[in-house]
Image: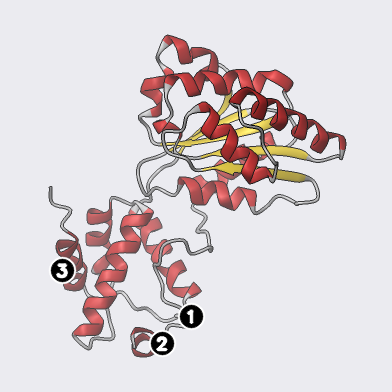
Amino acid sequence: MLCKHFGFKTVPFMPQQSNFFESDSSKLDIVKLQTIKHVPQISLVTGSIGSGKTCLVNSFINTLDPIEFRVVSSQLIKPSIRGLFKNLASSAGIQHSIYGDDIKIQLLNYFDEIRNQGKFTIIVLDEVHTFSIEVLDQLKTFFDSHNNFSLILIAQPEIFKKLRIHACLPLKQRISIFINLKTLSLSETKKYVDFKLRTAGILKPLFDESCFPKLFQYSEGIYRMIDQICFQSITEAFLSKSSIISDKNIEKAYNSLDYNF
């Protein structure tokens, strides 16, 4: 019903949609990540909740030729070191041992095999701000052991509090690329909405110009907030049988989401 009313080919502003919006800053961020492709390095990607950290990294990963690169990833929250190595082994398709140290050796040997085949391994770890000091310290040792992979760490800004702790300084000093995602500006917010509508098959204006200042104010330029408010406002307009989204729809949508803590 929603698609028929507005003429959508697909429902826009849904989470986990694969199309990536490239802002000016995100284009530069992807260029920075390109430097880890052949020389073992550690990069740290940070940003507030919903700012597109994982989307940015996935967009970079999608540029990699699978013939040349092997990507191994983990999204565990508060993992033990054994749990992390076990999860990485499963992602790599390795029949892993029981003990953490043995799994670590299996992974390093596997990455050596990959290197001998002419490929390079990139490990992506999400939710790193939840990692304990012990696990963060073990990452440093893991990276140093064979120096045969690059590591992308994805975290919320509170990771910096942990990296200031003396035990984590050796890891911090090994990070060569720091990327802190910026929120969208007002003009970029409008471009992002237009991009999302185009991917849904809509080429004509759907949001009244009066929407964007309020949308930017409420979302603070955060991708996930923009998506959520826009989808709710489209629903509001559909229920009122309107074909254009107004600033009143934006305001009502935001209020219904109860972000006024």
- Structural distance between the alpha carbons of marks 3 and 2: 23 Å
> What kind of residue is marked 3?
Lys
Question: N-terminal of the two: label 3 or label 2?
Answer: 2
Q: Horizontally, is 62 left or right of 200 in the view?
A: right
**How many numbered badges does the structure rendering display?**
3
> What kind of residue is marked 2?
Gly
Residue 103: % across, % down: 65, 30
As helix, strand or loop, the secondary structure at mark 2 comes to: loop
**Residue that carries the numbered disc 1 in the rendered image:** 201
**Residue that carries the numbered disc 3 in the rendered image:** 252
Query: Mark 3 and 1 residues: CB-CB less than 8 Å, in contact?
Result: no
Residue 260: % across, % down: 13, 51
Residue 97: % across, % down: 66, 33
**Residue that carries the numbered disc 2 in the rendered image:** 7
> What kind of residue is marked 1?
Gly
Question: N-terminal of the two: label 1 or label 2?
Answer: 2
Query: Mark 1 and 2 residues: CB-CB less than 8 Å, in contact?
Result: yes
